[in-house]
Image (cartoon, rainbow, N blue to C red):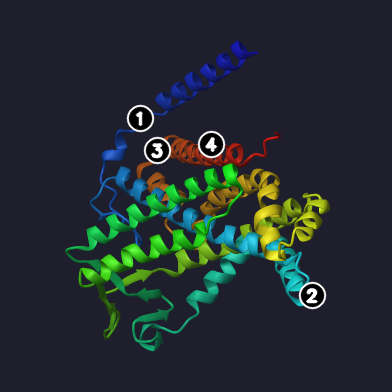
Amino acid sequence: MLAGIVALLAWLVANTAHNLETRGLKTGFGFLKDPAFFDINQKLIEYSSRSSFGRALLVGLLNTLLVSALGIVAATILGFAAGMLRLSRNWLMARLATAYVEFTRNVPLLLQLIFWWSLLTGLPGVQDSLSLGNVAFLNNRGARLPAPSAEPGFGMVLAGAGMAVVAAIAVSAWAKRRRLATGRGFPVAAIAIGLIVGVPTTLFLALGQPLAWDVPQPGRFNFTGGIQVTPELVALWWALSVYTGAFIAEGVRGGILSVARGQTEAAYALGLSRGATMRKVVLPQALCAIVPPLTSQYLNLTKNSSLAVAIGYQDLVSVGGTVLNQSGRALEVVSIWIVVYLGLSLLTSLFMNWYNRRIALVER
């Protein structure tokens, strides 16, 4: 079987190479060094129309990673909140969460994406921008927000924040060992928040607030200063978050319901409140059932980000399509798409599988 698969792949490669050579089509990835001669409206790294095809694809990849990362965070928050609200004793909140989940799951993602994009591009023009305290502005070109500008000494604030995170992790590990050994609790959450918030805030104030803000200023035809957030990014991020969050909510609800009711009753008998029971008893056990489907939803969100081409957000697929049209290297561009999305999926699965093993319940 293995030999047959290898032989089939070898034949496909040889046949493709022969057909390309017969038609006089070049192969290889050398075209990635050629100038792109097209612009990209959103870029996280320096790029111009004279940059190479390879750099254009890198800009598209970073845009894909940006919207995927933001979407995963927002979808997780929405999903866990909606999943727990569906089981709430509050009739109104439970019904609202149910309506959100059922409606969102049954409306195609592409339709939701176009709806949010149309809503955002229907905002007033630049001259009639909606002002938020004269520091941020909303219009049909997106949001214009203040841009932070680091000053000397801000690096020390970041270093202090990093050290505070490390200290919080160390305190958490120590408190866990102490609890297992003695059964005594420790206010880890309060200490961690105090460290992570207090240390950088103290350094920030002590160093004279080494961070300036470039506030956008309205001009005759556009704004100057600040940072521009395009409506395509916001629409894609929100649509992916809301859609994926509805599916995550069902996984969370199912995971919570999978925990035996006797666990909850035992926690109440020990005097734990409803909130403490959910945090300390139910969710730790439910995560074992929640994480596997949660991984699938993360993968789906990353792959669904390729729908960005429908509204003009220049992600990897959109930029790759432009590169394909200008270079004529369809086989190479499609190969890059396949490798990138396969790599992202495998890395996500690898991390989530590690996390799933880490939280797995061990019988003693």
Image: 262 above or below 337: below
Image x and y of residue 303, in percent: 55, 48
Instruction: Name the amino acid, label 3.
Output: Arg
Question: Is the C-beta separation of discs 1 and 3 under 8 Å?
Answer: no
Quadrant in which the N terminus is drawn: top right
Image x and y of residue 80, in percent: 64, 60
The Cα atoms of the two marked residues, 2 and 4, are separated by: 39 Å
The quarter holding residue 2 reads top right
Question: Is the C-beta separation of discs 4 and 3 under 8 Å?
Answer: no
Residue identified by numbered label 4: 350
The local secondary structure at tag 2 comes to: helix
- In this rendering, the label closer to the viewer, 1 or 2: 2
30 or 306, which lies in front?
306
The local secondary structure at tag 3 comes to: loop
Sooner in the amino-acid sequence: mark 2 or mark 3:
2
Image x and y of residue 97, in percent: 72, 69
Residue identified by numbered label 2: 91
The Cα atoms of the two marked residues, 2 and 3, are separated by: 57 Å
Sooner in the amino-acid sequence: mark 1 or mark 3:
1
- The tag on residue 329 is 3
The Cα atoms of the two marked residues, 4 and 3, are separated by: 32 Å
Instruction: Name the amino acid, label 1.
Output: Gly
Instruction: Name the amino acid, label 2.
Output: Trp
